[in-house]
Image: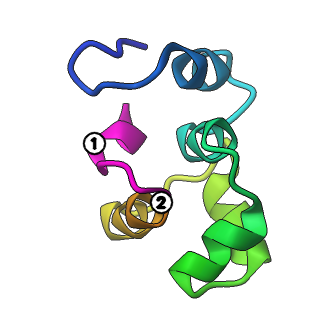
Amino acid sequence: MSNDTTNIPQEVAELAGSGRKSLSRAWREHLGLTKEQVAARMGISKAALEQIEARTAKPRRATLAKVAAALGVDVEQLVG
């Protein structure tokens, strides 16, 4: 996973690149935010955020844009 053009911190890239975590979850944890905080910012339930953050999830770009806004990052940083 390259972080040259999308400006992804090494820690986030490593967490997501290992296959253990989705890029959105890696960003949330890197920023020190809880699921509850991000879900509240998005106006969704914690369970809904967990589905979005699942490694196997394939959220639509519109959903990723909402996640990005809640995290304060660019949507391109969530699509790797």
Magenta residue span: 71-80
Q: Is residue 65 magenta?
A: no
Quadrant of the image containing the C terminus? top left
Identify the residue at image location x=34%, y=64%: 65
Distance Cα–Cα, label 2 vs label 1:
13 Å
Left/right of residue 71 with respect to residue 62 in the rendered view: right
Q: Position of residue 56 (x, y in %)?
A: 65, 45
Left/right of residue 37 with respect to residue 47 in the rendered view: left
Q: Residue furthest left?
A: 5
Q: Is residue 1 above or below residue 74?
A: above
What kind of element bears circle 1? Answer: helix
* Dot 1 alpha-carbon crowd within 10 angstroms: few under 14, some 14 to 19, many 20 or more: some
Q: Which residue is mark 1?
A: 76
Left/right of residue 5 with respect to residue 47 in the rendered view: left
Res. 10 mark: none
**Label 2 sits on what residue type?**
Pro
**Label 1 sits on what residue type?**
Glu
Q: Position of residue 63 (x, y in %)?
A: 42, 69
**For the residues bearing labels 2 and 1, Cβ distance under 8 angstroms:** no
Res. 59 mark: 2
Q: Is residue 20 above or below residue 54?
A: above
Residue 14 image-quadrant placement: top right
- Judge by depth and name the residue closer to the eye, 31 or 42: 31
Image depth: mark 2 or mark 1 in front: 1
Q: Position of residue 32 (x, y in %)?
A: 69, 45
Identify the residue at image location x=60%, y=26%: 16
Q: Position of residue 44 (x, y in %)?
A: 62, 84
Name the N-terminal-most of marks 2 and 1. Answer: 2
Identify the residue at image location x=69%, y=70%: 37
Q: Is residue 76 magenta?
A: yes
Left/right of residue 61 with respect to residue 52 in the rendered view: left
Identify the residue at image location x=69%, y=54%: 33
